[in-house]
Image (tube, rainbow, N blue to C red):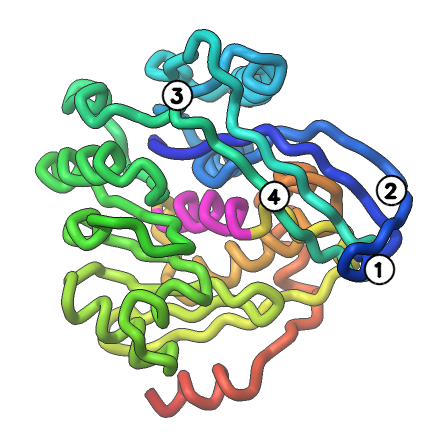
Amino acid sequence: MGVGLNATDTLLVVAHFPAYAGKVPFEAEILSPGGQVASALVTAAKLGLRVKYIGSVGDDERGRVQLESLRDTGINLNDVEVRSNCPNQTAYILIDQSTGERTVLWSRPECLRLDPESITPEKIAGARMLHIDGHDTPAVGKAAAIARRLGIPVTVDVDTIYHGFDRVLESIDYLVASSEFPGQWTSERDPFRALKMIQDEYGMKVAAMTLGAHGALARVGGRFIYSPAFVVNCVDTTGAGDVFHGAFCYAVLEGMPMRDTLEFSNAMAALNCTRLGARGGIATVSEARALMERAERRSNRDFASAAQRA
């Protein structure tokens, strides 16, 4: 089950990023569904899990595109709120064909904000895992607190600091943050110390961070695990982190050891980068395992050596 953001993206593919105040033609314009939690749930559903989404969607064309994508994946939408006269969350994403890197411009109108009063135990009960982001902090915080009371493990995807997020962290079992968040939260530049500080303060089972092209780092059982990224022909990095989170949820529920969980999630994220769009390259379990068996890894020496010492 997931509570959090969805978005409908417009991808603008350019040969290379323009210089500041520059002007370049774009090669393609593509409407594509995305969003942090929604894309993670689509990944989990395509990997074979039964999935339910709790969130809000606008009643415009972008909202319809999003709902159709979720419905076609077989996700339970019984608790999705369609907001009248409200546009869906939008992102315009510039994709540099020469590198596959993207720049995101996004907007989410206030009319999409989730009301914590709409999050009830009845909506959460029965899940094997709850996945959230941090945007509508009171609502996702309430969902996480309910899950904690019901004994349901909670994972979170967070990439920036939200007011009151400390109360959310109190209910988290698996923190998988962006590379920037641990340092921003703790004011500690060393990522190893930052993750340790967060885990020691809030007591989550796993404190982890994604590292983009360098893989992922996690602290579990008092030790660090560094998992290098896979080398692929990168077309578009959009949604790689979201797919990582969906794969992470799947791997945890399948009982994979944490090292295998990180490697599998890295493989799924890498394969998604070989296609355009936040959900363009979501792979199967067999495709991810094939990549894990044959592909070259891109290991960061600093993270690898520090993880061995920590």
In the rendered image, which quarter contains the N terminus? top left
> Residue 295 appears at what percent x and percent y?
70, 66
Determine whether 223 is above or below 140 in the image: below
State how far apart marks 2 and 1 are (Cα).
13 Å
Determine whether 276 is above or below 229 in the image: above
Secondary-structure class at tag 4: strand
Q: Earlier in the sequence, mark 1 or mark 4?
A: 1
Q: Earlier in the sequence, mark 2 or mark 4?
A: 2
State how far apart marks 2 and 4 are (Cα).
16 Å
> Residue 299 appears at what percent x and percent y?
60, 78
> Residue 235 appears at what percent x and percent y?
77, 52
State how far apart marks 3 and 1 are (Cα).
37 Å
* Residue designated by label 4: 105
**Magenta residues (range):** 241-252
Q: Residue visible at 57% across and 45% down?
A: 285
Mainly helix, strand or loop, the magenta region? helix
Residue 219, picture quadrant: bottom left
* Residue designated by label 1: 98
Tags 2 and 1 touching, CB below 8 Å: no
